[in-house]
Amino acid sequence: QEQLQESGPGLVKPSQTLSLTCTVSGDSFSNGRFYWSWIRQPAGKGLEWIGRVYASGRTSGSTDYNPSLKSRVSMSTDRSKRQFSLRLTSVTAADTAVYFCARTGGYSFGGPVSYYFDLWGRGTQVTVSS
Amino acid sequence: QPVLTQPPSVSASRGASVTLACTLSSGYNNYRVDWYRQRPGEGPRFVMRVGTGGIVGPKGDGIPDRFSVLGSGLNRSLTIENIQEEDEGDYHCGADVGSGTNFVFGGGTKLTVL
């Protein structure tokens, strides 16, 4: 069964860069049907979509980011390792959260294609503190 | 883009039914909403999508028939019948607001099974 697993430092100092990697076990990573997203959840709060990256074909590496985070976020892929990564620069305490990676599928269901998160990792806690 | 509003918490007795609300902000009554269940210590899991006509597409893997949705006006609710202890957790509603280029979520509802 396909799984996603987040990895990376659990503690980052303020003003530094948060870096996380998601490893995909399964064959869908380079399947053109899917994008790959990062989503976070601060303690006691709702989910926040950070952005997505594409890992297939000529447009591999193309990205879309949450406008509120766009100036600090970058994402990339490593198809040979079935991994995609998140970098978030200039972090503050407000970036403390559980970070999830998620497979993002596009589906029509009889109307325009729209996307949802059909497979998630278990999440990894990242704390920003000196 | 729409704002999704959820009550922070709901409780229900084992074997009862409960409806979890997700309300779209005014003017966005055509949006479809996705429901996700998050058990303690786990990542969220897709439950199903709901539009004004009810469920859109298939349920997520392993979601039992006890789960159903209803869409009317600005409301996109999830109903769980015959609640079990395994249903306890956080329930999130979310929406694709940019054809895959932007997404929003509600604040989540914590469901406690008594």
Image (cartoon, coloured by chain):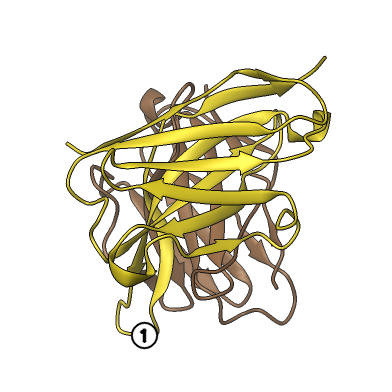
Farthest-out residue, bottom: A111
Subunit ID for the residue under disc 1: A
B35 and B68: which is toward the camera: B35
B75 and A46: which is toward the camera: A46
Q: Position of residue A1 (x, y in %)?
A: 17, 36
Residue sitting at x 42%, y 27%: B14
A127 and A30: which is toward the camera: A30
Picture mark count: 1
Q: Position of residue A127 (x, y in %)?
A: 70, 21
- Residue B111 vertical placement versus A32 (above, below): above
Q: Name the residue type under label 1.
A: Gly
Q: Please name the residue that numbered disc 1 is placed on.
A: A111
- How dense is the environment of label 1, judged by Cα within 10 Å: few (below 14), some, or many (20 and up)? few
Q: Position of residue A10 (x, y in %)?
A: 60, 18
Residue sitting at x 32%, y 78%: A108
Whether residue B71 can be seen here: yes
